[in-house]
Image (cartoon, rainbow, N blue to C red):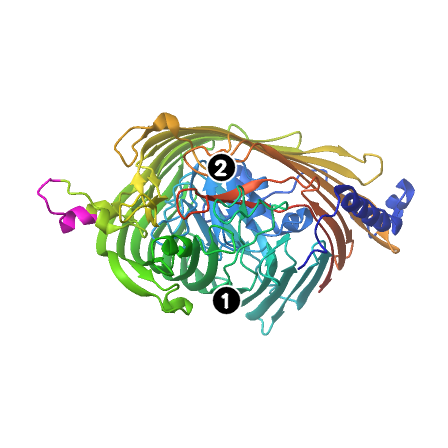
Amino acid sequence: MLTGHKKQGGQAVLKRLILGIAVALGTVTLLPATAVAQEEATEKVSDTLEEVIVTATRREENIMDVPISVTAISGEELADFGIFDVTFIEQMSPNTTLKVSRGTNTTLTAFIRGVGQQDPVPGFESGVGMYLDDVYLNRPQAAVMDIYDVERIEVLRGPQGTLYGRNTIGGAIKYVTKRLNPDDYVATAKFSLGTHQMVDLQFSGSAPLTDTFRVGASVVSFNRDGFGENVYLDGLENYNKDVTGVRFSAEWEPTEDLFVRFGFDYVDDDSDPRQGHRLVPAAVSGNPVLDDVFDTESGLNNPTQSVEATGYSLTAQWNASDLLTVKNILAYRDDETWTPIDFDSLPVADLDVPAIYENNQFSEELQFLFSADKWNGIAGFYYLDADASTEFDVILDQLGDLFGLPGYNAYTAGDVNTKTWSIYGDFTYNITDQWSMNLGGRYTSDKRTSTVLRQTKIYGTSPTFGGIAIPIATTSDFNGTETFTKFTPRVSVDYTPNDDQLLYVSYSEGFKGGGFDPRGQSSLAPDIDGDGTVSEDEVFDFMKFDPETVKTWELGWKTTAFQDRMTSKIAVFFSDYTDVQVPGSIGYDTDGDGVNDTFVGITSNAGKAKINGVEWEGQAILADDLGRTGSQLLFGWAVGYIDADYKEYIDVFGEDVADERVFQNTPKWTATGRFNYSMPAKLLGRPGTLTAITSISYRDDTSQFEVENPYLDQEAYTIWDLSLIWAHDDGHWSAGIHGKNLTNKEYKVAGYFFPNLGLENNITAFYGNPRQIWGTVQYNWF
């Protein structure tokens, strides 16, 4: 058993951090005021905030001029803050939840302004769109992207449809990788070493092969021991990391008006399975609750945990004239996940789920971007052909033994094909120098074709997972197709009283198509017309769920003040959320003996809700030359408030239980404040800049599901992070020490609640990362 990383006292770890900082500072010479004035290599700190350029509206604009609620974090900021992967972005964007899905290492659960999806099974689309270099990722598997070779990440809040390929109702997250250097050979090597035996290696480089053609690549290896261990299966860790990633790009620019880029990305995640921590003792076997929340005693390790994802894209942009630019984005992606999900987290097979997810997608997007003196805009066509399939067993050995059914297995295989196309447009007309109006719209057609096969088996696992299980009954054999269409508009009015202020009001609609419950059991379909027979139409309606829509009003005010030393972005929004899709699973007794022997999908369009809130982001230069010439102190903040309330919620029994339901993964308050202090300093005689960054992030009470759960819901908590970075003035060397969750706060991010499925009272939780401390050294060749 691996125990070397465990049970370290908080004081000991903090002492290590202080010692590391002291050692670093011991080699740092703080330049006196006179030396700073004389040191030619030391660059003068800017006395104004840097302009942030984003492409939220599909064209490059200053973020302060964009009438959309958007957060942008540059690649340099991400590195300085010590951001590992996209889930940490939730600390920097208000009213945003990003987390690793329960029982997985790389599946993403995303919510923005109360809208999202935490069920990774095919058939359910995310309410938040994830984009990698303008390519929409159709499935959440392998979407917890690590941060490397990144130019910036943008978080767009609210419905997105008139500007983006795929219609998303909650918002969008854009992961933008770096463009290649067109003129010089450049390379970067980065090495990180930290607690939990963390060893990360990153290497990237690019080379211009001709005046018009260049290539570049990045190779990374992220490795870390587990935060906990599997105390039953020796050699397996829990919450460890073993990831290899590769990115390659080639850019061709034969003229100043034509640009073509080919991109390739590959991820191989061989981390051990992430299993849950039981919150209650086992009811039958008697296993107690483990002391360490990151430990598990799961007995399931079939199949071997693995995640592999590959993507290809070809982007071409032609500046046809001063008026017109044509852009085309062609892409193909696929991923495969093999995972042993142990719902009971026990050595016994009380509720074991070996599973496989396979996804592939082809997308084509053609855009026409227009720009003139008084108006600009975009018109586009988008097409997506995506297939998502899953196959899993539900092994209930203990229950089978109780009823003389050896190796009892509730098996499910589902496949969902999505063919969607849309046309969209978004145009802005400048009425005067101060007033402008925006009109946009999108027509979407989503065609879903779904198959669901559910069987009762005996003798253990299915052949897919190396077993010999045989079916003894079929409870679902469904095949259905439906097309969902919708037109969604957007309109806004902008007012710029001067160069430093933007006020806007907008109305937008979002639409997410319906589908078929991939875990639905067609044999449960009711005889609605009472004729004594359940017809195919009644089965079809039982398995189907309808689209959901969001209608949002937003008022925004963006301002730059104090001679470009402060920026502020305030947005107030009011949303009507209707036909809310609520997927879920419940234990079900198939033979009427009073014991649940499987779980079935129950997906409903629960009703309607109102979601209102406020977001305030900004940053300010508080002081220059604070304690030392050439120094600077900045403060940044992001505050979100949301009031999400169901006005109608019809449960499976036809009752309105809105007063008993809450919004999942939507804390009422989120807030982050960070101080950034930089000053000239020499390291080993080399002139550079020393920067200290500290941040506090707060998240209010959070419910994991629509029904409040005292076991799994997370009370409000605060995270403290700290970074110390030194960068050489010539841009070659940099080094840093980073600490995350320094108070070692314990907090839940997900869980399973199946007390009535199986015999062991199965309630398990998954937790956010504990305290992590690491150092980084980077060298840039150019």
**Percent from the top left, x then y, of residue 360?**
38, 63
At label 2, which amino acid type do we have? Ser
Residue drawn where x is 37% and y is 55% of the image: 400
Residue 67: tell me if it is visible.
Answer: yes
* In this rendering, position of residue 455 left or right of residue 634: left
Q: Quadrant of the C terminus?
A: bottom right
Assess whether residue 535 is covered by the magenta stretch: yes
* In this rendering, position of residue 495 left or right of residue 670: left
Tell me how far mark 1 sits from mark 2, CA to CA: 31 Å
Q: Nearer the viewer, residue 377 or 539?
A: 539
The secondary structure type at the circle numbered 1 is: strand
Q: Which residues are magenta?
A: 529-540
Question: Counting residues from the N terminus, which is met first, the one under dot 1 or under dot 2?
Answer: 2
Residue drawn where x is 50% and y is 59% of the image: 300
Q: Residues within 10 Å of mark 2 (few under 14, many from 20)?
A: many
Which residue is label 1 attached to? 264
Assess whether residue 767 is covered by the magenta stretch: no
Residue located farthest toward the left when viewing the structure as drawn: 531
